Amino acid sequence: MKKVSLWILLTIMGMTSSFAQVTLGRTVFGCCGMSVTVGGTNYNYTIGEAAIGTKIGALPQLTIGFQQPIDNSLLPVTLLDFMAIQRGDDAEITWTTVWEVNSKAFVVERSVDRVNFQPVGQLPGAGESMDPRFYEWIDPGIVHLGSEVFYYRLRHIDLNGGYTFSQTEELRIVRPDQKVIVYPNPAQDQVTLQFSEDTEAIGEISLWNPLGQVIRRIPSPELNAARRFELMVSDLSRGTYILKVNQAGKVYTFRLVLI
């Protein structure tokens, strides 16, 4: 998570409050009946409300839930993470919340074009919760649906009937006879290497120019939780390159075009 400078309110048992500048990704700086003044503006919080602070420009902005709200409005859920991972023939959709207020349900929605989404599953929300909660939904048999890529998002529904959306997560399908796929291709700033679930240890990833020279070498790449490796290429000239992936003694070669 990108770290930014934040202002947080330090209040201890009714003692005098003061602001201190720290370096954090996120922090709750108002909740539970408190009254907070930030940048000359007063914010009041009832029991069960909270605000997550991020600094944009000169003043902190109030963020809670899935996205940056307009006019500092509060959303009922703080989403810590949201991932879509291929597990065999299925998609495993997981998310973690650290705060839920009036939380009724989470609807998992799927799309093949990132525009038209359809609900594929639903789990009940926690109602009221100040503790981290982990959720999991399995979307079965997606490898047999005829698409090479799926997009997932969450629709969170509160007890009043309102709803908000999470960010959209992209899932590229790795077929049983594939060990790694590379996308997007052509690419601009970043290339994703998606490895299959049964991938053995990756020996080395290397990028070669048309003259046969190695211009980038990653000896022991670490995959993230979704079994992906992100290769930054924004500093390279446009053109055609060769991407090689060494896995268990076998070398997979890809023609990569940067535009």
Image (spheres, grey):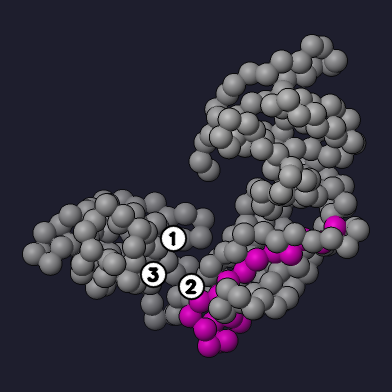
Q: Which residue is mark 3?
A: 184
Which picture quadrant has residue 55?
top right
- Are circles 1 and 2 on residues that touch, CB within 8 Å? no
Q: Residue at x 79, y 61 (%)?
A: 163
Nearer to us in this view, 193 or 74: 74
Crowding near the residue tagged with mark 2, few <14, some 14–19, many ≥20 C-alpha atoms within 10 Å: many
Q: Is residue 58 above or below residue 163?
A: above
Mark 1 and mark 2 lie on one chain; the one further toward the N terminus is 2
Q: Residue at x 39, y 63 (%)?
A: 192
Crowding near the residue tagged with mark 1, few <14, some 14–19, many ≥20 C-alpha atoms within 10 Å: some
**Where is residue 92 shown, x and y percent of the image?**
62, 67
Which range of residues does the magenta coloring cover? Answer: 141-158
State left or right for residue 214 relative to residue 136: left
Mark 3 and mark 1 lie on one chain; the one further toward the N terminus is 3
Q: CA distance from mark 3 to mark 1?
A: 13 Å
In reply to whether residue 4 is colored magenta, the answer given is no
Nearer to us in this view, 243 or 202: 243
Q: Which residue is mark 1?
A: 228
Residue type at the position of mark 2: Arg
Under circle 1, the secondary element is strand
- Are circles 3 and 1 on residues that touch, CB within 8 Å? no
Residue type at the position of mark 1: Arg
Which picture quadrant has residue 93?
bottom right
Res. 75 in view: yes
**The label number, if any, that marks residue 95 in the structure image:** none
Nearer to us in this view, 237 or 231: 237
State left or right for residue 172 relative to residue 79: left
Q: CA distance from mark 3 to mark 2?
A: 10 Å
Q: Nearer the viewer, mark 3 or mark 2?
A: 3
Q: Is residue 7 above or below residue 243?
A: above
